[in-house]
Image: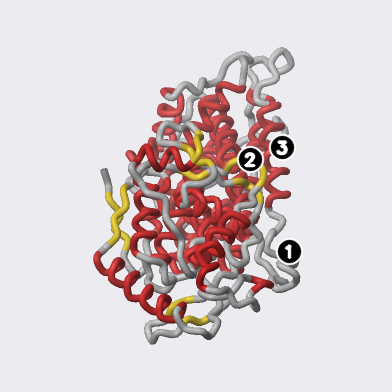
């Protein structure tokens, strides 16, 4: 099994994906263990002094003015975890919780939190045992980090609350720890706070969304190319010299992908035949510009994620010179903004894909295709309601594009008076990515059928490869009306599994 070694300098996106989705094992580097021990010595020294230090010998948030006596500090750390584990609603996905815990471990191992090495090791042990704390949908405002979600994870480390075992069964966390031979942690000064104070949930969801969107944008380039073929459009608008004079990187990459898919097609260039067109519609002609803008948005979001992955997000933090200082690094604004930006880009990509699908189904705009791509229009409805489903998904995408980060709601008796709502931005982006997959699947379903209905003209070899692969995956081609939902589900699974890109790249080589 793949092993991820956590050091003091952060982790990579591939590390997060390996742990969250691939079940990779985790080890702490010797450097991290040494940094943990050194920082803990600083915290222990401060805890022994009579002067109050925030997070070490005081309360938290609006209660930070109270100095806590030594005999109450262990209770304080337990209490902060118990009281902050206040989530409600449905459980969030296993991969999200694993990413959340792993990223908190990443910050703990930086040596800036003051957590003891044994606590960090217990975090790794819980992940390696396949134990997943029960974390709920609601409870984070994305400021002071993802407090409630992280608290539910910390509760599991204490042997309290509920968690899911490696067999998928939810049990009391104490039982699962005992079964795995893991001793619950007894939290000491600062440790409870250090386990709760980070942007780890929203960051983990950002990293996974970026991986998914990278695949979906390539898939959308392919389905756009298939639609262009089916509509007998021109590929001249994809010429590199046209995109070089507007040098947005994403636009150039998207145009190059479409051009690679269309190489050798007999279907392109017929826009001047029986029904002359000076230009193709925007949804076809401007596909690289729209998808390209989304790609550039992804590139910016990836830069933010990389910076956050290299960060130590906690309050207060232990500095190398021995100071323990309060700060505002837990604020989720940098991550929240790009989560919202990605939801906007995804909504627009879904919207343009739906417009191409609608054009394929309309006999007045499809340049010779049968109405709704039906076998016997009137007797058969064809893909009419598949487009309805796609339109409903696009409408939902537009609602999900409303930014969460533009909102703020004061909390903690006005101490935390401006919050990021980054967790909410991440949750809605996950839904948006899920819906975008379905939208692209409907375009794939319609475009492959439409290309096959263009008898006598051969599609590009790459297009043929996609059609053959999707048919082999159980998505049926043209014919009389049938129960459509299973076909759409199979198309969704085909896109979701990355098989659109896989089929094309066997012909074209790697897409950009």
Image marks 1 and 2: residues in contact by CB distance under 8 Å: no
- For marks 1 and 2, the one nearer the N-term is 2
Left or right of residue 300: residue 422: right
Which residue is under mark 3?
392
Q: Is residue 312 above or below residue 206?
A: below
Name the residue rendered at 70%, 73% in the picture.
415
- x and y percentages locating residue 319 in the rendered image: 42, 81
Residue 146 visible (yes or no): no
Q: Secondary structure at mark 2?
A: strand
- Quadrant, the N terminus: top left
Name the residue rendered at 64%, 71% in the picture.
61
Q: Is residue 305 above or below residue 399?
A: below
Image marks 3 and 2: residues in contact by CB distance under 8 Å: no
Badge 3: how crowded within 10 Å, few (<14), some, or many (20+)?
A: few
Which residue is under mark 2?
90
Q: CA distance from mark 3 to mark 2?
A: 24 Å
Badge 2: how crowded within 10 Å, few (<14), some, or many (20+)?
A: few
- x and y percentages locating residue 421 in the rendered image: 66, 61
Q: CA distance from mark 1 to mark 3?
A: 26 Å
- x and y percentages locating residue 206 in the rendered image: 52, 56
């Amino acid at each position: 099994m793949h092993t991820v070694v956590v050091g003091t300098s952060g982790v990579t996106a591939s590390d997060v994906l390996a742990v969250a989705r691939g079940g990779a094992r985790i080890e702490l580097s010797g450097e991290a263990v040494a940094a943990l021990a050194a920082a803990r010595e600083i915290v222990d020294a401060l805890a022994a002094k009579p002067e109050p230090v925030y997070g070490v010998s005081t309360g938290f948030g609006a209660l930070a003015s109270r100095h806590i006596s030594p005999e109450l500090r262990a209770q304080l750390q337990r209490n902060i975890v118990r009281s902050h584990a206040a989530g409600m609603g449905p459980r969030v996905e296993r991969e999200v919780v694993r990413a959340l815990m792993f990223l908190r471990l990443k910050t703990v191992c930086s040596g800036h939190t003051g957590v003891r090495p044994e606590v960090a090791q217990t975090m790794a042990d819980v992940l390696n045992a396949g134990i997943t704390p029960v974390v709920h949908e609601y409870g984070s405002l994305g400021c002071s980090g993802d407090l409630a979600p992280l608290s539910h994870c910390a509760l599991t480390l204490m042997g309290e609350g509920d968690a899911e075992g490696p067999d998928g069964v939810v049990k009391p966390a104490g039982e699962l720890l005992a079964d795995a031979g893991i001793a619950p942690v007894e939290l000491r000064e600062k440790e409870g706070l250090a386990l709760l104070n980070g942007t780890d949930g929203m960051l983990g969801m950002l990293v996974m969304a970026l991986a998914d969107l990278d695949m979906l944008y390539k898939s959308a380039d392919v389905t756009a190319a298939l639609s262009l073929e089916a509509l007998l459009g021109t590929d001249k608008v994809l010429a590199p010299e046209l995109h070089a004079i507007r040098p947005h990187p994403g636009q150039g990459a998207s145009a190059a992908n479409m051009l690679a898919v269309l190489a050798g097609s007999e279907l392109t260039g017929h826009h001047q035949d029986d029904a002359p067109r000076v230009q193709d519609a925007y949804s076809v002609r401007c596909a690289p510009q729209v998808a390209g803008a989304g790609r550039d948005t992804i590139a910016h979001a990836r830069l933010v994620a990389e910076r956050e992955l290299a960060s130590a997000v906690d309050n207060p933090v232990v500095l190398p010179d021995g100071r323990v200082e309060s700060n505002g690094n837990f604020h989720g604004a940098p991550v929240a903004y790009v989560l919202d930006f990605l939801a906007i880009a995804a909504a627009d990509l879904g919207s343009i894909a739906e417009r191409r699908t609608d054009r394929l189904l309309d006999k007045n705009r499809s340049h010779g295709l049968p109405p709704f791509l039906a076998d016997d229009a009137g007797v058969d409805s064809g893909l009419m309601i598949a487009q309805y489903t796609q339109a409903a998904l696009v409408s939902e995408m537009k609602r999900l594009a409303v930014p969460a980060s533009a909102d703020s709601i004061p909390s903690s008796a006005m101490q935390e008076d401006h919050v990021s709502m980054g967790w909410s931005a991440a949750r809605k982006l996950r839904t948006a990515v899920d819906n975008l997959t379905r939208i692209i699947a409907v375009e794939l379903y319609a475009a492959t059928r439409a290309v096959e209905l263009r008898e006598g003209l051969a599609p590009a070899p790459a297009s043929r490869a996609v059609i053959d692969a999707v048919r082999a995956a159980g998505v049926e081609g043209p014919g009389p009306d049938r129960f459509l939902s299973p076909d759409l589900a199979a198309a969704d699974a085909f896109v979701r599994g990355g098989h659109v890109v896989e089929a094309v790249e066997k012909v074209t080589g790697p897409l950009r």
